[in-house]
Amino acid sequence: MTAIQICALISIIIAAALLYWIGYRGGLANGRIEGIDEGINSQRTESAKTIRELEASLQFIRADHQRLAEHSRRSQDSNAIGEEHHQTMLDIAEKLRIAAETFRAFRTGKKLERDTRALRDQTLAMAALLVPATQEDAA
């Protein structure tokens, strides 16, 4: 082989090695960039999933909070019916008892007596419902 051929062979080998090295480094850089992009996308996907789960949890907690707030408001409203209402119901029941006794004295007032006694029983039942609400306040 001549000197020119040897130099050309060395140049071809060096050029091939340089070309291989540039391709390897380029591929490595591209792989690294794709890996970083894939990692970021994976993080975004996981973050989006976590955000959706947290939003669903927040909606559930909000609904539960509204339900509890409504229950609390109803409880406070029912507690507002206190001892004076209980006493008023007992007074109404007593007046209905007197009316029933009065109607019983008349021979034609049997239906009025029955209706009055039924109303008295309903009033006493409603008064009995008011008693536990005042006992809960004491507890």
Image: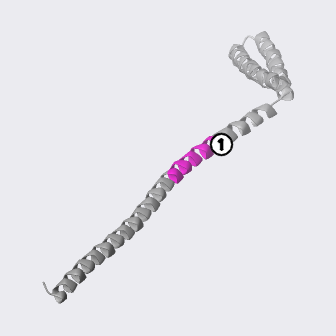
Instruction: Examine the rendered structure and indicate whether residue 53 appears above or below residue 110.
Output: below
The residue singled out by tag 1 in the image is 65
Residue at screen point 14% across, 87% down? 2
Which is more toward the observer, 81 or 101? 81
User: Residue 53, image x and y in percent?
Assistant: 52, 48
- Where, by quadrant of the figure, is residue 61 drawn? top right
Instruction: Examine the rendered structure and indicate whether residue 77 appears above or below residue 43.
Output: above
User: How many neighbours does mark 1 have within 10 angstroms: few (below 14), some (14-19), or many (20 or more)?
Assistant: few
On screen, residue 111 versus residue 13, left or right, reads right
Which is more toward the observer, 121 or 9? 9
- Where, by quadrant of the figure, is residue 129 drawn? top right
Instruction: Examine the rendered structure and indicate whether residue 4 appears above or below residue 78.
Output: below
Residue at screen point 76% across, 36% down? 77
Which is more toward the observer, 70 or 6? 6
Does 54 lie within the magenta span? Answer: yes
User: Residue 84, image x and y in percent?
Assistant: 87, 28
Helix, strand or loop: magenta stretch: helix
Dot 1: element: helix
On screen, residue 114 versus residue 57, left or right, reads right
Point out the stretch of residues depicted in magenta: 50-65
Does 38 lie within the magenta span? Answer: no
Instruction: Examine the rendered structure and indicate whether residue 62 appears above or below residue 123.
Output: below
Which residue type carries mark 1? His
User: Residue 3, image x and y in percent?
Assistant: 18, 87
In which quadrant is the N terminus drawn? Answer: bottom left
